[in-house]
Amino acid sequence: MKFAHKRVGAVAAVAIAAALALSGCADTGGGSTGGGSTADTGGSGGSDNLAITFLPKNLGNPYFDTSSKGGKAAVEALGGTFAEVGPAESGPDAQVSYINTATQQGVGGLVVSANDPKAICDALNEARDAGVKVVTFDSDTNPECRDLFVNQATADGIAKVQVDLIAEQIGDAGEIAIVSSTANATNQNAWIDKMKELLAADHPDIQLVDTVYGDDDEQISFDKTAALLQSHPNLKGIISPTTIGISAAARYLSTSDYKGKVALTGLGTPNQMREYVEDGTVTSFALWNPEDLGYLAAYATAALITGEITGAEGDTFDAGDLGSYTVGADATVLLGDPFVFDKSNIGEFDF
Ligand code: RAM
């Protein structure tokens, strides 16, 4: 069962946890992992060109392995050809050469999580001029560079769940810091801005003292966490709004004297965080289902390719097992709400 379908009305941590428990939804779907094949050279005989290439921020991140798994399942269910390509590291313009290659190959659609809101825009617009439908997912570009953005949850909701969790874990007072991904990432930067607003408005006794960037690289994130704790001896908590960052920070904390003393929350995958929840390093953290996100993005891309939608507000399309979705303002489609994982439910999830 796809848990994005279990719409949760509120983003308050307790409400989400309760809804998740009620949903009893743990199965993230079967199928093989994504990746691998090269895109074919496009449609033939006048049929729709359902060669759809996924371009994550970088390869080797379990979060994107899972989103590509969902994308592959959807593309194949639609009778298309799935491919996944991407850079090893999340540099601002590291994706440009992959976009250009996909354009030359004549793919029908590109599904991109952007490392930078502007740096890949020219390449994406050249792809669009050549007839490629461009959909961003997970991390957007500037809106004028894509046809549609498939958003995992609202920035407000993603920010609020993390602020609620850290406030709960540190008694709503003390110094906190953020271990983010790359300095230019559209998604993390939007969430951090919203978190700052929420902290200022509702948590006067929490001070955000630092934000560091682990570049969605495990070792850099680990080292930045160690340095952060050294330079801020009074730190009470860390928010890491990246699945690579939070698991690296947890790995550092778990064998340090800070374990159980400095709280850690943010956005993580259950499989990467399980051992740290079980050993007491982490109490709770949040995420959505990346597999559903990739699946929805693939269906949205196919709907653009076939002309079922144009990206206009109010357009509706079928997203297979996830049901029907409607395009909202600014050519954005919303998957759902974030969920909170903790000791009581983490065993039910496998991604
Ligand atoms: C990392 C990436 C991704 C983000 C998740 C939460 O895997 O930065 O873009 O959405 O964390």
Image (cartoon, rainbow, N blue to C red):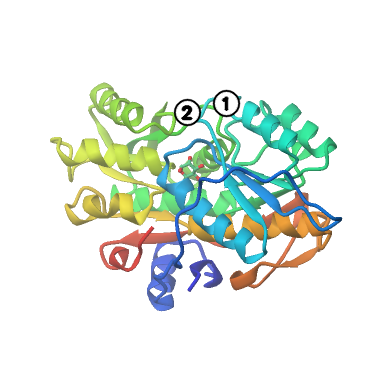
Query: Of the residues shown, which amino acid type is indicated by label 2?
Result: Glu
Q: Write the residue at 39% across / 76% down.
A: 24
- Rendered position, 115 above or below 49: above
State whether residue 31 is above or below residue 141.
below
Q: In which quarter of the image is residue 205?
A: top left
Look at the numbered disc 2 and give the secondary structure of its residue: loop
The percent position of residue 134, horizontal first and vertical second, equals 73, 44
Label 1 sits on what residue type? Answer: Ala
Rendering quarter of residue 333: bottom right
Q: Mark 1 points at which residue?
A: 94
Of the numbered discs 1 and 2, the one sitting upstream in the chain is 2
Q: How crowded is the residue under tag 1: few (<14 C-alpha within 10 Å), some, or many (20+)? A: many
Q: Say if 75 sits above or below 9 in the image.
A: above
| Residue 209 percent across, percent down from the top left | 38, 29
Q: Nearer the viewer, residue 282 or 55?
A: 55
Q: Looking at this view, is 342 or 233 the one in front?
A: 342
Q: Name the residue under label 2.
A: 89
Residue 321 spot, x, y in % from top left: 59, 72
**Distance in Å between CA atoms under marks 1 and 2:** 7 Å
Query: Residue 18 vs residue 228: left or right?
Result: right
Q: Is residue 308 visible?
A: yes
Pick whichever, 281 or 27, lies toward us.
27
Task: Look at the image and tell me in which quarter the C terminus lies.
Answer: bottom left
Picture residue at 61% right of the left edge, 61% below the top:
76
Q: Residue at position x 61%, y 24% from top?
A: 93
Marks 1 and 2 close (CB-CB < 8 Å): yes
